[in-house]
Amino acid sequence: MITKGLIIRHLILPNNIENSKKILKWIKENIDEEVYVSVMTQYFPTYKSKEYPEINRKISKEEYKKIEDYIYKLDIKNGYMQDYTEEDEEQYVPKWEY
């Protein structure tokens, strides 16, 4: 249980693995190693993002594995990755009714 400190949450986007690597490297090189890094894999296309082929999908297992390996390579002390799932993430989104 984290009771104090900084948690950085980073959402992996499809077709943007190199950007995620740059962010993680920057965190490693510029922020105290006591920071917690939570890498999220729950992205799914919604609303207008479905109109853009490059982000009209969840991340792949290969993309997930590349970032997982990179976190270990960087030796981020307090790095955590959300589990990869092929479940439909939309089931967790509230149905907003006006």
Image (cartoon, grey):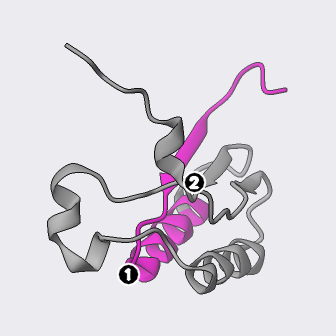
**Picture coordinates of residue 92, whole percent (x, y):** 53, 37
Q: Is residue 50 left or right of residue 41?
A: left
Name which residue type carries label 2: Met
Assign the N terminus to one quadrant of the image: top right
Q: Which residue is mark 1?
A: 15
Q: Residues within 10 Å of mark 2 (few under 14, many from 20)?
A: some
Residue at the farthest top position: 98
Question: What's the CA distance linking mark 2 and mark 1?
Answer: 15 Å
**Residue 71 got which mark?**
none
At 54% from the left edge and 59% from the top edge, which residue is drawn?
27
Name which residue lies at 72% across and 21% down.
4
Q: Horizontal and vertical percent for residue 74?
A: 70, 75
Q: Is residue 48 left or right of residue 79?
A: left
* Magenta part of the chain: 1-29
Question: Which numbered disc flags the more N-terminal residue, 2 or 1?
Answer: 1
The residue under the point 41% across, 58% down is 44
According to the picture, the residue beneath numbered tag 2 turns out to be 40
On the picture, is 97 further left or further right than 59?
left
Q: Residue at left 62%, top 75%?
A: 64
* Amino acid type for the residue under numbered disc 1: Asn
> Between 75 and 13, which is closer to the camera in this rendering?
13
91 left or right, relative to 98: right
The reply to whether discs 2 and 1 touch (Cβ–Cβ < 8 Å) is no
Q: Is 5 in the magenta?
A: yes
Q: In the picture, residue 76 is in which quadrant?
A: bottom right
Q: Position of residue 19 (x, y in %)?
A: 39, 74
